[in-house]
Image (spheres, helix red, strand yellow):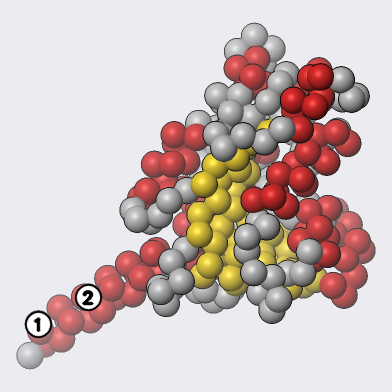
Amino acid sequence: MRTCGLEGAFALEARESLASKMTSGWPRRGRKLLEIRCGDGYFLEAFWQSGFDVTGQERDPGLFEKARLRLKQAAEFTLGHEEHLPYDDGAFDYVVCLNWSAFTSDVQPLLEEMFRLATAGILLAFPSVWSCHGLGQNFFPQASAKFVSPWKIYRRLRTLDPEGRPRWAANLLGPAFSWRGDGLLARLNRISIPLPLGAFSLVRLDLSASQTGTPLIIRRRAMAHEAAANGLSRNT
């Protein structure tokens, strides 16, 4: 499931550490968290152990069963496509996706769904084209690797929430051959920086607590009210 060389034990540990750090400020007791493309449940289990009420979504039946076996009764699961999830608007406090870009580089539909479902915050992981690993693909391309421009993601976030202030972080800063051992390069790869310059980059957006829904939901409701008002005025 995990591509771009991110499947090794070293990289997996580094990714879990950074995801935990980026969500450390989120309240947990009684808070619902959805992980989109939860895979075999590795990260979902970590979120559950940290105190969230978790739900996992996965499209691959094999991985779906592995996640269910891993978490048993600790989580709820949905098998299906991540861009058309069977949940009401604002069904979760937090929505995270740590495996999206292994499958597609089109982030817009996914972000729209994340904004639709979350009321408090979203977290998205991606392998940055600005990373050392990403730049290396110019010379040693991987057919399965889909590196993403942070600028592209930023523009999409601005479209969905013009007032939002994304928070960025990244680790695995060196080339893939350095993601092992305990030497200097390995230690550098464990360091996180507040810029999307790593093979594992994250963007977190906390939604305003004063809102009754996410910006996308609010705009949809406003458009619906406007359409209803226009229809009423035409009929009167």
Task: Work out whether 87 lies above or below 167.
Answer: below
- The residue carrying pointer 1 sits among few (fewer than 14), some (14 to 19) or many (20 or more) residues within 10 Å by Cα, namely few
Q: Secondary structure at mark 2?
A: helix
Residue 85's label in the rendered image is none
Residue appearing at x 75%, y 41% in the figure: 15
Q: Disc 2 residue type?
A: Ala
Quadrant where the image shows the N terminus:
top right
Residue appearing at x 67%, y 36% in the figure: 192
In this orientation, which residue lies closer to the viewer: 137 or 236? 137
Q: Return the residue at label 1.
A: 234
On the rendered structure, is 156 left or right of 101? Answer: left
Residue 227's label in the rendered image is 2
Task: Work out whether 97 lies above or below 92.
Answer: above
Point out residue 61 in the picture as x, y percentages from the top left corner: 81, 56
In the image as oriented, which residue stretches furthest toward the bottom?
Answer: 236
Q: Give the quadrant of residue 64.
A: bottom right
